[in-house]
Each structure stands twice: as C-alpha cells, then as structure tokens.
Image: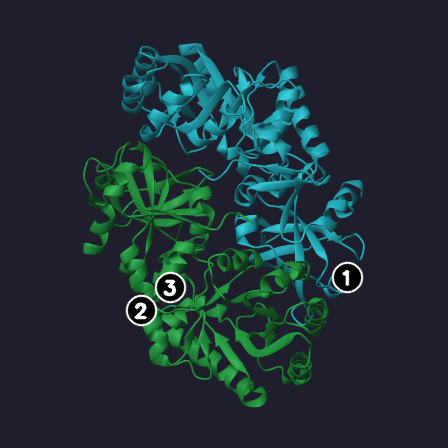
Chain colours: A cyan, B green
C-alpha cells in the first residue's frame, strides 16, 4: 500500500536516533486544502483550530490556501500565533479572568474573540478592558460539557441582551462544540450528531440573530451543509489520528503524523517488543478496539534492514519512556533491536503537544509553541 | 490540617495567572532526606532516579545530603545531568543502539552505567565504544515487563560470562525494577512484593557475584532491609502523588507538588466546575477509587476570597486544556470563577514532565530539562 511505503522508506529515518514525530507535508497539506474546499463549498468560513499543530510553520500552510481566521485554546497560544502575524483569533476557551491583562495587550493589535458562559465573568471582562474585543457566548449543543445548554431560553432571554450591551465587547453570537461527535462511530452516526446539534442552533439564530460558530473534526470531515453556521472550527483534521479513523472521519492514509520509535528489545517468550517510545512521547490517550486497549498501532518496520509493512501490532502499554508491543511469532521474527517501528498515534493533538516538535519526511524540523 | 493550609495560603498564588505546578521545597527536601536516611540505615547506596524531577535545582538538593550516584531514563537526561556536574550516572533504559555515539561522548567524562538485556546488543555496544562504560544486565524480578527473568539460569549461565568478557564494558551486575509493586495496596502487600523479588535476586548474587541494583518507590518507602542489593533507585518519592497514596507508600501530606488551576466556570445544574487545567497540564494517568476514575483530587480553594479546604472533589475528565470537576451543591457554592482550585496529581512524574517547569511556594521558578 502506497501510504505505508512513503513512511517506511523515508530517508529521514537514517538521520534520527531517538523517538521522533514524523510529519508528511503532502498529506497535511492535502488535509487542510480538502477542509478549506469543503468550507468554501458549504459557504462557511474556515476558522481552523490551531491547538493540534501549535506551529507557525504549519499555520503558514493554512495561510497559503486563504485562511485568515484561526481558533486557539489558550491566551498563550493566541500570543504565539499573533507573533506570526495572525490578526483574527478566537480563544475558544472560557475566559480565565487572571488573563485579562494579557488579553488587553493582545487586543491592541489583534481582532480577538473571547468566549464566556456567564454574565458575571463577561462583566468583569468588560470593566477591565482597555481595548474592545469580540464576544462569543459558549453554547452546549448536547455535549454535556461546557456552556449554556442551547434550549435554555429561560436563561438566554436575559443573558443575551445583557451581553449585547456590555461596553468594550462586540457581540458576535454563539459558539458551540459538539464534543459528543467523538462518541459517534461511522458516517451515519456522525451525521446524526451533526443534524441534532444544528437543529439546536437554528432557534438561537432565529431568536437572537448574531453569528454561529461550530466545529469539530468528525462532523466537519463528513458534512457538507452547516445550516445556520457562519464558520467552522475543526482542528484535529490537519493531522488526524487513529481515534478519527475509529470514528469514521478519515482513513489511515489521511493520518499526517507518525511516531518513529527505536526497537530496544525483543522477548520471544512473551511475544513482545520493547520500543523507546513511552508516555512522554505518545501521551496516554488510548483506544479500545475489539476489547483491546492500546496507545498506538504500528504501520511497519523501517531502518537499515529494509522497510516492511506489519499489520496488527498494537502498543499495549506505556511506561514513562518505553512502550510494549504485542507481536505474534511470525511478526516478531521480523523485528530486532536496531530496527525502527513506526506507529500511528491514538490522539495526534496530545502526541504533538507532548513532543513539542515534528520532523518532516524531508528532514525539516518544524518548531512548535514553547511550553507556556 | 496543616499540610493543606501551607498550599492553600501560599502567597505565590497571587502572582500566577495560568495553570501552574507548585512545589513545596520543605516537603520535597524532607522526602529526599528521609529516603537517604533509610538507605544509610539499610547499608545500601541511594542512586535516586531523576526522571521525576528532571531538574538541576532539585538534583542539587540531593547532592546536599550526600547523594553522588544517580539514575536517569534516557541518554538525553544523562546529558542534561552530566552538564550539571553529575559524574556517576546509570541510564536505566535498555540500550538504543542509535545512541552509542552520544554514549561515547558522555563516557569521556562520566562514569556511565548502561543497561542491556541481550548479548547481541551488548556486543554491538562493545565494538562501537571508544571509552569504557559500566554494564548492567536488566533482570525481570516478576514485573513481567523488561529484562531476563530472574530464574532463567539456562539463559544466564551463558549470558553472564559472555557479558563479563566483552571489551570496553566493565561488568557490574544485575539491575531489577519491581514494577509490580505498583499493583500492591497497603504495606503488607508492598512487603510481600519486596520479599518476593529479593528472594529471586539472592540466587543471582550467589551464583554469579556482582552487584545488585533494585528500586521502586513503593518498596523503598516501606522496606528497611534490601537483602543482597547494593543500591536502591527509587524516583517518584521526591514528589510522591495520589497513586503512591493509594498504594500505601506515603500520605497526602508527603506529596510535594500541587497543580493550581484557575476556575473558569461553575455549572450549578450539572454540579460541575470547569477549571483551566487539562491533559496538557496533568497528563492523563488516572486512578480508580471506589469505582470512580479520576485524574486528580482537590485539596481546596485558594485565592483572593480566602483559602478553604474542600474534600472529595475529583477531576473526573480532562480535555486538552480544561478539566471537569464534580462537586456536590454545598461545595459548589464555595467556588466561583476567579478562584483557584488546587489538586494533587495522580502521577507526578508525568505531570512534571508535561509541565516542564515548577514554581516553589516561595515563588522561585525551577527549570527542568528542555524537551529533547
């Protein structure tokens, strides 16, 4: 299969010696162009979430296809991207009042969107602002996580007009994240979540006007119509991962990052391989497939002994620095210390975050945001 | 309770605005002095594992109580501590042959211990070394993870003499880690694991001579006699965490680090608090207590409205940047945006690693190893 060979035969593997997160620029650019085209065709703005890649360089690839608005998950991340010239940034995280001074500094030169979920916090913000910012109200469209539930008109009828009238705050509208799309499996279930949350957002738009911002990778990867929404904010799609494969948002060939791990031991008795690649490299989100919990899935062996696709190898446990891989005897005989095993990560956002750096298949180091 | 007040009333909280890992220097120094005293009384060397703190500064506190030998989990970490003057370092991770050039550079000026688990890798190392290093054989004392099982004399009778005769390698002996001590609950079970693994190591010492190195935080926190061992290598004890409390290795008052998180939302209907503090701050190891899985446990509220101990608040889920805390109504009424919630981490090694920096209660920033 072509998509495997590209990774397994990458020349960059001969240049590394430690666990390394590899990135295929062609796949990543294809993912982002595809999403931009999808947004254009649906008539919505793409405001991609940059928390997955956290990189100036990857951000510029978005700019090249015409993206001008972005989403981030912290004030620190807004500062990082503002420093690279981004001028329209929504911080899609409920306001932390201790960061108002930093928000004031940013708002001097950035069109900044701030998210609130209650009037007290919004009023505190309004009173402390020296520069106007855009205000979004966080709506829970059924995820059961953060925000005012979309059907609570008893609350919203008081809250929305009050927010619309706060000084220094430019009312934008409603921002929702369908976190429950991550519980869907298959296109049909994804489209059901998508239909459900849009149905909850239509009445908000009809009753109060304003903009609607939605977005999560599963529904944005599958849907073509975003109803009342003006913009979509998917993030993970830039890299995708095994979780998105399980959900049905992408195929394995769409995954744009791969963790390369040196093999440091093979235990024939236990049918196990030990790799250098642990919790501090993969992070610890896991998936359950067919009753087996795992932290990554191998695509194959690489290195000086030659590339070989290997199917069904699961990273079944992670210590701080090393990972244990279960392998049947016939596969185990293909692996020895000095080889590399390449894995798809379960959750690329957390893997990229903890690694803090990625290397393209052409050997270019892609720096990411320093730890705040 | 005194140990709670120290954290909740720390003046440093008025100086921070983002999720911050706090460290109580007095507790940490007490933990490390206690372990040094325990090792001295047992007549073994303390070779603490530095993967938990990954900090020059905290390393120096060990030096002040007479520690000269250390353990690390990667070549990168050995380089980091060698740069601060440590001269006797064991890399307690199976050799990754791609790192032999880095090992050669380190071995020029450091007494370096390298861990292997098979002859092929050891031979590769021997042939590529330009400076001698110390060689340890990794033994599995019952953890079922990495190393040659302690009872496999059929293997060891050939392997040990071969290792003893490799050029450039100074044979040291056997290094074991009782990872299964983490499955113990209570002192009795910890001591049972301890007794079991020592029983497996005695025959190795009797048959082949050489040194024995053991060590994990649970058994080293409880046991006073280490049988045939010459040195112990616990690491986590410097900070401890909720996992060690559940195992029975320490009390909550011994935990030396606390995560301070800004409260950004309170949802009375759902009896939930939203904090700024997610997977990128805590990492994602979890504990099950009484059927409930959680990622951290609050010790109380801090901030300008005054300190208040709050019991039983669990961090029940983590997104990338935020955490959800369940709270009964009477506790919920004590919490509002603008407060801080302070949490004990489940696994301090991973929390410190992902944060990359800690701040003492006196406001001193403690830098850690940069990401490799």
Chain ID for label 1?
A: A
Instruction: Tell me how far mark 2 sits from mark 3, CA to CA.
Output: 11 Å
Which structural element holds mark 3? Answer: helix
- Asked which quadrant contains residue A204, the reply is top left
Residue beneath disc 1 = A334
Chain ID for label 3?
A: B
Q: Residue at x 42, y 22 (%)?
A: A106
- Asked which quadrant contains residue B219, the reply is bottom left
Residue beneath disc 3 = B62
For the residue carrying disc 2, how many other residues have a C-alpha within 10 Å: few (<14), some (14-19), or many (20+)? some
Is A121 situated left or right of A94 in this image? left
Q: Position of residue A196 (x, y in %)?
A: 51, 25
Quadrant where the image shows the N terminus of chain A:
top right
- Mark nearest the camera among 1 and 2 is 2
Q: Position of residue A130 (x, y in %)?
A: 33, 16
Residue beneath disc 2 = B34
């Amino acid at each position: 299969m072509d998509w495997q060979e590209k990774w397994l035969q990458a020349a960059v593997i001969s240049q590394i010696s430690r666990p390394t997160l590899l990135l295929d620029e062609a796949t990543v650019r294809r993912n982002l162009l595809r999403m931009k085209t999808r947004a254009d065709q649906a008539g919505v703005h793409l405001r991609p979430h940059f928390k997955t890649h956290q990189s100036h360089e990857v951000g510029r690839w978005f700019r090249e296809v015409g993206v001008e608005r972005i989403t981030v998950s912290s004030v620190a991340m807004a500062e990082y991207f503002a420093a690279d010239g981004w001028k329209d940034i929504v911080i899609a995280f409920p306001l932390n009042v201790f960061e108002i001074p930093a928000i004031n500094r940013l708002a001097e030169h950035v069109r900044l969107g701030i998210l609130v979920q209650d009037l007290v916090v919004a009023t505190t913000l309004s009173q402390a602002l020296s520069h106007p910012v855009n205000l979004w109200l966080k709506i829970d469209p059924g995820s059961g996580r953060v925000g005012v539930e979309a059907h609570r008109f008893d609350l919203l009828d008081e809250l929305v007009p009050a927010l619309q009238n706060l000084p220094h705050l430019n009312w934008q509208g409603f921002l929702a994240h369908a976190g429950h799309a991550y519980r869907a499996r298959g296109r049909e279930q994804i489209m059901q979540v998508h239909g459900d949350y849009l149905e909850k957002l239509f009445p908000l738009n009809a009753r109060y006007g304003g903009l609607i911002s939605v977005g999560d990778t599963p529904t944005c990867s599958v849907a073509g119509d975003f109803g009342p929404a003006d913009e979509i904010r998917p993030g993970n799609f830039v890299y995708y991962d095994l979780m998105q494969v399980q959900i049905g948002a992408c195929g394995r060939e769409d995954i744009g990052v791969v963790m390369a791990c040196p093999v440091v031991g093979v235990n024939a008795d236990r049918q196990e391989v030990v790799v250098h690649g642990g919790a501090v490299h993969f992070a610890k989100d896991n998936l359950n497939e067919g009753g087996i919990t795992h932290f990554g899935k191998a695509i194959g062996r690489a290195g000086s002994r030659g590339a070989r696709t290997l199917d069904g190898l699961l990273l079944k446990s992670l210590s701080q620095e090393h990972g244990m891989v279960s392998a049947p005897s016939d596969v185990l005989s293909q692996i020895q210390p000095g080889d590399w095993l390449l894995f798809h990560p379960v959750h690329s956002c957390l893997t990229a975050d903890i690694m803090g750096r990625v290397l393209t298949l052409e050997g270019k180091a892609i720096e990411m945001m320093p730890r705040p």
